[in-house]
Image: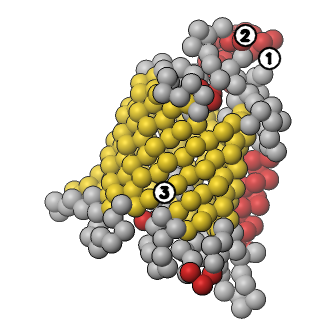
Amino acid sequence: MKLITSLLLLCLSLPLLAYDTGRKQLGHLETYKPNTIGYTKDDNDVGFVDFQLSFMYPLFHDNQPASAAAGFLPYPYFTFTGRFGQYIRTRPSSPVIAKSYNPELFFRYWLSPEGKDKDHADKLDFIYGHESNGQSINTESSYKQKQIDLIADGDDPAYADDYISRGWDYVSMRWGHNWNQHNTADSHFTTYLSVKTFLDSGLLQKNQEDYNDWENNPEGKPRAETDGIELSSRFNTSFNSGIVSGDSIIVTYTTGLENSFQFNTYKAEFVLDIGNLPLMIWARHGYNSDLVDYYQEVTSVGLGIEFLGL
């Protein structure tokens, strides 16, 4: 947690540094992944209020596709995504459980011509990231002690699973391509392909915190078997019927970099604007619904509000 706090403080201080000699502001905080609040129901858990906060900061540039005169140079970014679940009236004390802390540093190469809308421009990213859930249990003895503590408090000992520590450093490459480069209409079809490798030992995570043998779950497996290759397609629709309008449809397929196509995840999202309310409806089946039980095959559904800007 000290590391996460330091990264957040660093990010919040970046606006003070993002000025050139003419005092012109180069960059500002922007949305990275969607900022959402909603309700999630996994078939292996009770429902919970699901929060996600995500932003990125362009380091020393204005986050616009570069001109050809600037040369083919990488543009650095810092990002942070956090996810939390609050169990309201389904668990004693209505706890807030940290699901994921995910800082990244990545370098982007713009592949589209100058002047192209950055949200629909082609791009190639090289990423170094860390993902963990901020929990502390990493031994069998501490796990059993947590179960005893929960029983003493009148809670289900199975909730001890939520406190098992998970963490990985990874390197990744992500390519985004807009198939409607010359389309002047509001509709856009964009695909993203990413390949991710989890490191045995990294800069932020000394050793991987994968599944532990003492968890005694027959589904236990390394995360690299459930994650590492992802293909996502986003269609921005121009559908509009007055108060209600379609925003986007997103379909994502994920599989492991190891034993690829054996443990697969499918997710579909639909964002519908009702007035100024962006309503997100989604369903998924597969793995990584939660870092704690990433190795379990789970069906999930959710409803939420998506906030696109900061």
Quadrant holding the N terminus: top right
- Counting other residues with Cα less than 10 Å from the Cα at mark 1, is it few (<14), some (14-19), or many (20 or more)? few
Q: Name the residue tied to disc 3.
A: 176
Spatial separation of the CA atoms under disc 3 and disc 1? 40 Å
Say which label, 3 or 2, has the lower sequence index.
Answer: 3
Front residue (pair 132, 234): 234
Mark 2: amino acid:
Trp
Which residue is at 69% across, 42% downward?
Answer: 170
Residue 14 picture location, percent across and down: 73, 68
- What's the mark number on residue 214? 2
Front residue (pair 181, 137): 181
Q: Name the residue tied to disc 1.
A: 139
Residue 244, placed above or below residue 260: below
Q: Tell me if I can see residue 303 in this picture.
A: no
Q: Are marks 2 and 1 in contact (CB under 8 Å)?
A: yes
Q: Are marks 3 and 2 in contact (CB under 8 Å)?
A: no
Which residue is at 37% across, 34% downward?
Answer: 283
Mark 1: amino acid:
Thr
- What's the mark number on residue 6? none
